[in-house]
Image: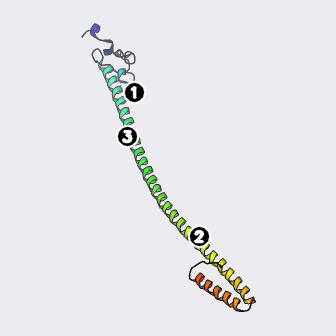
Amino acid sequence: MTEEQHSPSDQPLEAAAPLAPPGPGAMQPAVECKGIRPIKDFPRELTGLSPEQIEHHYKALRNSHISLNRSRGQLLRRSRELSEARERFLTTLRSYEERLVLIGQEKAEAMRLAQDMHQELEAFDSKQQALDQLLQDLDAAKQETGFWAIFQITELIERMRALLRGGNRSHG
């Protein structure tokens, strides 16, 4: 191919164009690619390039490829680390959810026990009040004399029996 047949995309870009063949005794510039360079920085065709320019482009392309692979490896490592961290986080979250469910069940059981105890205390309190009332009625009946007092005492004894058996009858 001749110079006129090359399309503009086949020609090296300005970044590669200044690399003219070195004159006798001129030094080849150092390869400056330490990072990732776009592919269009490199010529598509090697025709018309000196061996030194080809070597320079090869080294720059190789360095770019090494840098790209290094970055890819770092990205894969970070992605793997984040996946592992996410899994640890989800595992911890699931364990917290399980603990919360258990705590909720224990709390519900404690609430049932507390309600049962509250009902028992209310029943005890009402029995205590009924017993106190019976004792007051008994003291009042002792003050009276006659058949009516005996009848009241008998009725109070029946109420005490009923109360002690678990009933909660008040005087009536």
- Nearer to me, 119 or 66: 119
Position in image of residue 52 (x %, y %): 32, 21
How busy is the neighbourhood of tag 3: few (under 14 within 10 Å), some, or many (20 plus)?
Answer: few
Q: Secondary structure at mark 2?
A: helix
Location of residue 111 (image quadrant): bottom right
Q: Nearer the viewer, mark 3 or mark 1?
A: 3
Q: From this viewpoint, which residue is outermost toward the top?
A: 4
Q: Is residue 143 left or right of residue 158?
A: right
Which sits earlier in the primary sequence, circle 3 or circle 1?
1
Location of residue 70 (image quadrant): top left
Q: Which residue is mark 1?
A: 33
Q: Is residue 100 left or right of residue 122?
A: left
Q: Which residue is mark 2?
A: 118
Position in image of residue 85 (x %, y %): 43, 48
Label of residue 76 in the image: 3
Type of amino acid under label 3:
Leu
Position in image of residue 8 (x %, y %): 33, 12
**Real-space Cα distance between discs 3 and 1?**
23 Å
**Real-space Cα distance between discs 1 and 2?**
81 Å
Type of amino acid under label 2:
His
Q: Secondary structure at mark 3?
A: helix
How busy is the neighbourhood of tag 1: few (under 14 within 10 Å), some, or many (20 plus)?
Answer: some
Instruction: Name the residue rendered at 65%, 81% in the picture.
Output: 131
Which sits earlier in the primary sequence, circle 3 or circle 2?
3
Q: From this viewpoint, which residue is outermost toward the front?
A: 147
